[in-house]
Image (cartoon, grey):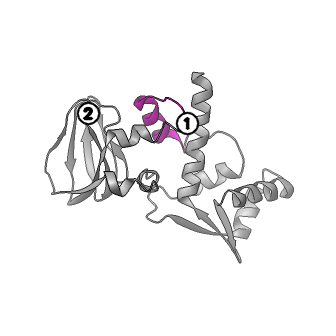
Amino acid sequence: MDVIFFLTSNPMFQEVAKLVYWEKDQIINCPENGQYVYAIDEGSVMQYAQKNTSWGKGRVFGFTREPTIIRPLCKTVAWKIPLIYVEESLKKVTEISIESLMEIESNFLTGYKKEDCIQWFIKRIPERIRTTTWKVEKETVRRDITKFMSNETWSDQLNDLKGLHIIQELGYYLEVDLLQFHDYLRQLNYNLLAQKNS
């Protein structure tokens, strides 16, 4: 899932990050313990680290702090982000390592195990969504979710999500604010990790 949403939602982002442009087949060397991470905004790349791994657009490179080579597969636009910006974003929660952040960002969607309406939304959010909102027919959601929970429970959970400004009702539709939704899920993971580390 695109973590660019998480990074750009912080007002400080525009002050600390800058756009870089990469041509097809250009080789970008990221040294070990480098000072920057990269988030792909448009385009597609391959990343080679100590383990040969492939990443798509919207992913953040460099959290492992291993020597990394990024090779654009086409003309690509990326945000070059100071590593300290990412570290600072964690201080409001607790002291969490960069390795733990990588784990959170990789798994904050797939790591949610509770079978409830949140799980329903996670499973149906398109992997490469290019907008910050998602509109879905309200009755379709209700019909699917009430197969495994009562109408009353669904209504309560929906009201909770509306109270958190994650969902709003627009006539026959529900509109999901993906920025808020991702932030909510990520906060759950931070809290779980903080409990585990305390």
Residue drawn at (26%, 42%) of the image: 47
Q: Which residues are magenta?
A: 94-108
- The answer to whether 191 is drawn above or below residue 120 in the figure is above
Query: Majority secondary structure of the magenta segment?
Result: helix
Q: Are marks 2 and 1 in contact (CB under 8 Å)?
A: no
Residue drawn at (35%, 36%) of the image: 63
Query: Of helix, strand and loop, which one carries label 1?
Result: loop
Residue that numbered label 1 is attached to: 93
Q: Position of residue 32 (x, y in %)?
A: 23, 30
Crowding at dot 2, Cα within 10 Å, few <14 / some 14-19 / many 20+, comes out as some
Q: Which mark is residue 49?
A: 2
Q: In screen coordinates, is 152 left or right of 35?
A: right
Q: In screen coordinates, is 135 left or right of 152?
A: left
Residue drawn at (23%, 58%) of the image: 76
Q: Is 105 part of what is drawn in magenta?
A: yes
Question: Distance between the Cα atoms at labels 2 and 1?
Answer: 29 Å
